[in-house]
Amino acid sequence: MVGLLSLLACNGDRLPAGDPVRPDVILVSIDTLRPDHLGAYGYARSTSPFLDSLAASGLRYTEARSHSPWTLPSHVTMLSGRSPLDHAVIEADRRIPDDLPLVQEAFAAAGFATAGFVSTIFVSDAYGFGRGFDRYEDFNIAQEDNLQHTVRAEKVVNEALAWAHQQSDKPIFLFVHLYDVHYPYLPPEPWNYQFDKPGSRKSTRYRNYEFYKAKPLPAERMDHLRAQYDESLAYADAQLARLGDAWAQSGRKVSWVVTSDHGEEFGERGSWGHAHTLYPEVMRVPLLVSGAAVSSPAVRHDRVGTVDVAATLAGLAGLEFASAGVDVRGDVPERDHVFETSRFDTARLGLLSGNRRIDVDFERDRIDVFHVERDPAEKIVTLDSDPALEQRLYALLGEPWSTAETVISPGWMLSGGKRVDHRFEGPGRFAVYPQDSAITGATTRATPLPEKVVLSGETRAQLKALGYEQ
Ligand SMILES: [Zn+2]
């Protein structure tokens, strides 16, 4: 009886019919999702029946990568189609520049109803992500008293569905960001014991990457965390299936793009977490393109990136959007892929070019080169330098800028591929990395620095307690 009533409620509460010509477009970002934990990518556990169905009827990319191993830069890349070195929103106090075009603006300009429903501070409107959306629901997560309130997938999907029900027959562009697969991996019942014993907030409270590196978790605990991660994914998948059902029942045409901002390290480098390194366990992401605008399913091995998401979204709707990426449904050219992180006092750059990946760790003054075809897990260092690759990488840092005066910076700078001191006197030409915030005396700069986001002391303390600040 209950089932019948809920069925009737669904049938009586369909989404509006939609535009018969222009399909809706839905972008789903599942934070911290490794592709190898999805059924569609060969995982043994049943974590993702809904996403697997999208993959089976659409395009599944086996070689998709993010360009940053943490949330803020990666989502700016997704929505702008610019690499982190280009948009420069690579520190937790950087706001999206007002003149950086975002793909949702193209949808709004073309007459789509646009909305985003997101569940972490680093995709919140505090950073400017709401620009171009008619409705941007970040659940006030940037407020310190809300930071510890988990915004579960069910709540995100409920709000997204409620908004969709209020729409007219205009086509929809919907962005859904779920945080359930990010630590502390605490899915609700009954998912919390699907693969293992239930977790508890105490047992899974995240400390930080260096803590687990110094005190590696026992294999049994890591297995338990992996099970909780998988349960969180199964829960998120079930919630996304509700979106899928709502669209299917309404008969609205819809195209889907499903991806993630980065993966997660479960002991591959002796620790747990993400943001510190550029290895494949954190840089590989799923990418599925499915639905109305995809005519025949395929598994694609082209090397693509989250830099391509914006162009693909625009392409699905037949819109123009200038970016550094390509619509991955078409021919994908051979390109270099760049990676960076300066989170938590790290300073790494990476470049994937042909069958080689160079990893430059400025903090440790170390360069590693991997052969990614023979060694896709990047466990074996084949060379400790590759000047040609290094030069290609540094060229991507942007136009050098010059100064004739004293330069003072809170970080450090890169000049001719070499790290230089915080204070530099006299004329010089620099590519700056990380993007320093308080440079004085610079006479010319190729690109202006992004505006700062000021978080309160209480917010920063809360972020630290959650393991987001270290
Ligand atoms: Zn993230």
Image (cartoon, rainbow, N blue to C red):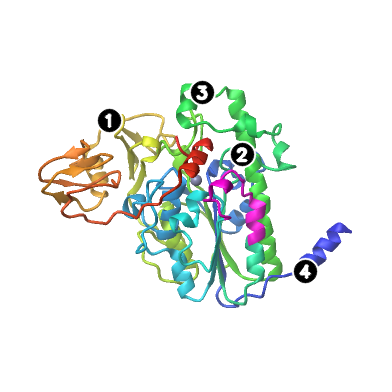
The residue drawn where x is 61% and y is 29% is 223
The residue drawn where x is 56% and y is 77% is 21
Task: From the image, tell me which residue sits under label 4.
Answer: 11
Q: Position of residue 30 (x, y in %)?
A: 55, 50
Magenta span covers which residues?
139-159
Label 2's element?
loop
- Whether ligand 1 has any atom under 8 Å from the Cβ at mark 1 is answered as no
Query: Does the magenta-highlighted stretch encompass residue 228?
Result: no
- Whether ligand 1 has any atom under 8 Å from the Cβ at mark 4 is answered as no
Whole-Å distance between the Cαs marked 3 and 2? 19 Å
Q: Is residue 461 visible?
A: yes
Sort mark 1 into few (<14), some (14-19) or many (20+) by Cα contacts within 10 Å.
few
Whole-Å distance between the Cαs marked 1 and 3? 24 Å
Farthest residue in the front direction?
457
The three-letter amino acid code for the residue at tag 1 is Asp
The three-letter amino acid code for the residue at tag 2 is Tyr
Task: From the image, tell me which residue sits under label 3.
Answer: 216
Sort mark 3 into few (<14), some (14-19) or many (20+) by Cα contacts within 10 Å.
some
Left or right: residue 40 versus residue 122 is right
